[in-house]
Image (tube, grey):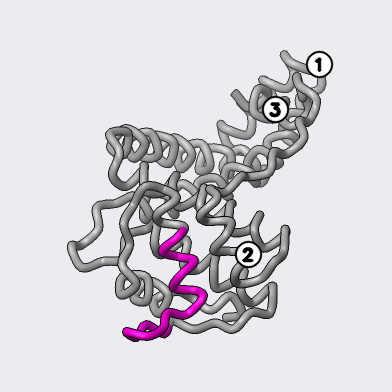
Amino acid sequence: MIALLANLQEVDPMPPQPKKKRKPTKALENCARAITDSDEFVEHVANIADRYRHERLLEEGPRKADVRKSLREFHRHATALTAWLRQANRSAPATPEHDAVKKIGGVLYGVPSLALGESQSVLSWLVQAEQAAGHCLSDTKPLPKKSLPNAQRIAAEALRATFAHHKLKWSATVTKQKQSDAVKILCAIAASAGAALTPEAARAALLGSKNPTT
């Protein structure tokens, strides 16, 4: 398993594919260009809309339970293998896991210590992946009834960062006469994903979003 995980970093069976640009719906593009006529801004908004759609499917779609179950399985195995590899990298006093990795290295490479070096890279990746899986589990757990849906929260935070990047005025104003640009674009993003979002709900999501500079 150690060799397989390590070799994943070295083997690239397919050449890198050019990254496809996300295409927004016409209504979403028009809303974005009304705020600022920038291709980069439109692309950023399209990416946010795509993430909104993805998160909404995970929250409301039939695969939600299966994805959460798979995340739990990965997290459990990653936690166990991380602990095992930490023991394997202890050399004083040598652990059974340390000797086991050296034996694996002897069979794979003819050099027992080589597998130890590779296991350190695998361990580093697993630690990050274990933490990421834990974060994903937190994001996919059932939310209290009054909690902000993940799709709205993530989109609002991404919009806040995008507005800051493009030096656009950030506001969550909603009145009978006026809606801020951020409210309008968040409603348009939701609509492009097939969801109805009221200006008031958009305002609540924006007000609950985190400042990218903090």
Determine the CA span between mark 3 and mark 1. Answer: 20 Å
Q: Quadrant of the N terminus?
A: top right
Please check the rendered image and state whether residue 179 is part of the magenta-colored stretch, yes or no.
yes
Identity of the amino acid at label 1? Gly
Identity of the amino acid at label 2? Arg
Q: Residue at x 69, y 66 (%)?
A: 37
Tell which of 32 and 59 is nearer to you. 32
Q: Measuring from the top left, give residue 134's x and y in whole percent.
A: 43, 51
Q: Residue at x 74, y 16 (%)?
A: 108
Q: Residue at x 36, y 43 (%)?
A: 58
Mark nearer the N terminus (2 vs 3) = 3
Residue annotated with mark 2: 33
Q: Nearer the viewer, mark 2 or mark 3?
A: 2
Identity of the amino acid at label 3? Leu
Q: Is residue 33 left or right of residue 158?
A: right
Q: Is residue 186 above or below residue 160?
A: above
Q: Which stretch is magenta?
A: 173-188
Q: Secondary structure at mark 1?
A: loop
Q: Residue at x 67, y 63 (%)?
A: 41
Residue annotated with mark 3: 8
Residue annotated with mark 1: 110
Please check the rendered image and state whether residue 194 is part of the magenta-colored stretch, yes or no.
no
Q: Quadrant of the C terminus?
A: bottom right
CB within 8 Å, label 2 to label 3: no
Q: Nearer the viewer, mark 1 or mark 2?
A: 2
Q: Is residue 15 above or below residue 192?
A: above
